[in-house]
Amino acid sequence: MIPLLVHGDAAFSGQGVVAETLNLSQLDGYWTGGTIHLIINNQIGFTTLSDDARSTPYSTDIARGVQAPIST
């Protein structure tokens, strides 16, 4: 089985378990086994416009740093 996480875009791009897991995934001896994230672009978690909240157009761009497969 593979975990499926459903959350809003603020929960993915903000600091938290997602960012920490992506950072740790590049360490030797650490393995998550994979997780599918279903991200809903609802803008609820942000107190500002997405253009002002991050330097990239998509909340999933944080995962591009570890070459994670992303489908839009």
Image (tube, grey):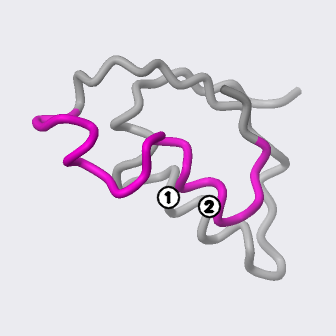
Task: Tell me which corner region of the image, top left, top right, bottom left or bottom right, holds residue 38.
Answer: top right
How busy is the neighbourhood of tag 1: few (under 14 within 10 Å), some, or many (20 plus)? Answer: some
Residue 4, percent from left and from top: 69, 25
Query: Is there CB contact under 8 Å for labels 2 and 1?
Result: yes
Q: Which mark is residue 58?
A: none
User: Judging from the image, what secondary structure is the residue with disc 2 in?
Assistant: helix
Residue drawn at (74%, 74%) of the image: 26
Left or right: where does residue 31 sit relative to residue 60?
Answer: right
Look at the picture and state if 21 lies above or below 13.
below
Q: Looking at the picture, which amino acid does disc 2 mark?
A: Leu
**Quarter of the image with the C terminus in it:** top right
Tell me if 13 is positioned left or right of 33 in this view.
Answer: left
Image vertical order of residue 53 relative to residue 4, above or below = below
* Percent x, y of residue 31: 81, 62
Q: Secondary structure at mark 1?
A: helix
Residue located beneath label 1 in the image: 19
Looking at the rendered structure, the kind of residue marked 1 is: Ala
Q: Which residue is mark 2?
A: 22
Please give left or right for residue 55 compared with residue 59 in the image: left
Q: Quadrant of the N terminus?
A: top right
Residue 36: where, in percent of width, then height?
A: 72, 31
Q: CA distance from mark 2 to mark 1?
A: 5 Å
Q: Please state the extent of the stretch shown in magenta in the rendering.
A: 46-69
Give the residue drawn at x 66%, y 56%: 64
**Residue that appears at 82% across and 82% down:** 28
Looking at this view, is 68 or 24 the one in front?
A: 68
User: Residue 69 occupies which quadrant of the picture?
Assistant: top right
In the rendered structure, does residue 60 fall within the stretch colored magenta? Answer: yes
